Amino acid sequence: MNRAEETTAGSPVAGNSTATDSSVDPASFRDPSGFVFWRNGQPYRQVNQVFAADWDAFVASGLRDRLLDRELLIPHEEAPSELSPDGQAWQLQRVEKLEFVSYPYEWTFGELKDAALLTLDLQAAALECGLTLKDASAYNIQFRGCRPILIDTLSFERAEPDAPWIAYRQFCEHFLAPLALMALRDARLGMLLREWLDGVPLDLASSLLPASTWLRPGLAAHVRLHARAQRRYADGGPGTDGTSPGRPRPTMSRQRQEALLRSLRGAVEGLRWDPSGTEWADYATNTSYSERAESAKKRTVEGMLKAAGVTKGGTRPADTRPAGTRVWDLGANVGVYSAIAASVGASVLAFDIDPAAAERHYRRLRADGQAAILPLVQDLANPSPGLGWAGRERRLLADRGPADVVMALALVHHLAIGRNVPLPMLSLFFAELAPAAIVEFVPKEDPMVRRLLASRRDVFPDYTLEGFRRAFATDWDLAEEIPIEDSPRVLFRLVRRA
Amino acid sequence: MFLYIDPGSGSLIIQALIAAIVSLPFLLRNQIRRGVGAMRRVTGRDEESPRTQ
């Protein structure tokens, strides 16, 4: 994976970058062709001298401009080279700051699949220009709204004639293997990417995939036989530069390279997953609300979002981050209330623990062309931690904020009763994410809470409306408290205490 | 080549093998197209399929 990716993906999006004046992104250290650094909260990418010829070839080929025109490459512009932290820049780029950096282990099946297809498209486009994609890291792809985009501008290099695709293995481990596991075994196996940041080992994927994958030529070749080849040649073989002892490096004509890409594309496109049958997939259609209550809740939430300052212009006029208020919809399910937030001008991250609900949400957004919402899979009782080298390459969820407004609708009871998280801890968690919150309290008499308590002892004496008010009063000032018509539930709009 | 990731020896070999195999149908198709094109030219019917190479 390259630095650009990590750099941009590391902290730029997260808003509360730790960079003060100028600092190299903690995720940007692997690729010697350049690195990402932060300066006054703005991400930059340096092209190192050693990569100058490849960078110039990329630009001269016209590929960069075409990718920018098609919005497949992160926008960037040349910056004064004197900003270079080490004075060794061939070129500096001022890179568009992402709204949020998400990670592959937070993506839905469809998001990972779309990122995979984009990567193959990029390699195909590169081949046409005499270039090649020198890495195929899933971390080089980010989402702007629901659209995948390459964030590493240093991913292209001049192709050597008849050279195999150096990033083939990485593509299979970052994309194909986890997609196959998600589609054919269990969508929750996407979380393997959280454990294996360099991609799911192919021998592991092979051992987990159903035996029937031997009958799928793409998977049989690119995962199963690939895993065997890795094992067989684990002690070395052809050198990538043809200089090592043993066999010379295999060669591949342009025609064969294109055939390989077609085969990979076929394998990826052939993976389908029906997002149903999980715990929450049909939750939105199986709620306990009456129509009147649901409609009242929608009206109230919209009013609270507006009162919280949600507009296209952002809540803070001096905000230097991308325009638009950032709303984090926690427990978004299929995104009913995310859509309301987007409709009043917010850019929304819609988190849900259930891969099926998030996938359905993503598919609908893609179909509708809605660009202001990104669904992500997230277990809020075990949110994405800091991972990778020194635990700083992939950042903790809370470090990638803050949001402007956090919404927790029909969520508190799942965490407080379903996961035994005390209300004061919930209050503190929300307060770490945003300065404003819209929270729904679902009392014990609600059918959904009764269901949660049906098979267990009620050890939650403080889980009452008064207990909720008391717990949240530590971190928040109450701005509004509105009971939902025709329902025992109550909506709170809260403002974090200074 | 600005190599900074490990392409893997086995991965290089298997991709070359796979690529050789999956390119065969396209190679065959092109050969058939050429053959058909040549035959049509011989029989004077090439104008019926202007896309034939």
Image (tube, grey):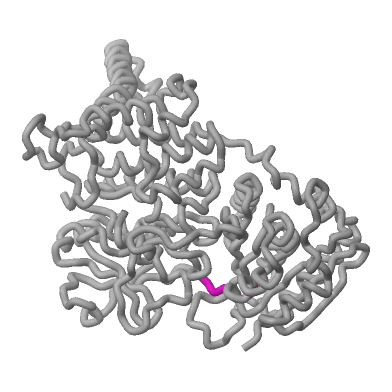
Q: Position of residue A93 (x, y in %)?
A: 30, 71
The residue sitting at the right extreme is A486
In magenta, the rendered stretch is: A401-405
> Is A111 on the left or on the right of A256, as rendered?
right
Which part of the image, by quadrant, shows the N terminus of chain A? bottom left
> Is A151 on the left or on the right of A130, as rendered?
right
Q: Position of residue A120 (x, y in %)?
A: 37, 43
> Is A413 on the left or on the right of A160, as rendered?
right
Q: Is residue A402 magenta?
A: yes
Residue at the image point whose x is 84% and y is 53% from the top: A450
Q: Is residue A417 visible?
A: yes
Which part of the image, by quadrant, shows the C terminus of chain A? bottom right
Q: Is residue A15 magenta?
A: no
Q: What number of labels is visible?
A: 0
Q: Position of residue A282 (x, y in %)?
A: 74, 45
Residue at the image point whose x is 72% and y is 63% from the top: A412
Q: Is A265 situated above or below A312?
A: above
Which quadrant would residue A350 be assigned to in this image?
Answer: bottom right
Prevalent SS, magenta region: loop
Residue at the image point whose x is 41% and y is 36% from the top: A265
Q: Is residue B37 visible?
A: no
In the depicted view, which residue is nearer to us: B17 or A73? Answer: B17
> Is A13 on the left or on the right of A408, as rendered?
left
Which quadrant would residue A48 be assigned to in this image?
Answer: bottom left
Q: Is A473 situated above or below B16?
A: below
Residue at the image point whose x is 33% and y is 48% from the top: A136
Q: Position of residue A258 (x, y in %)?
A: 30, 35
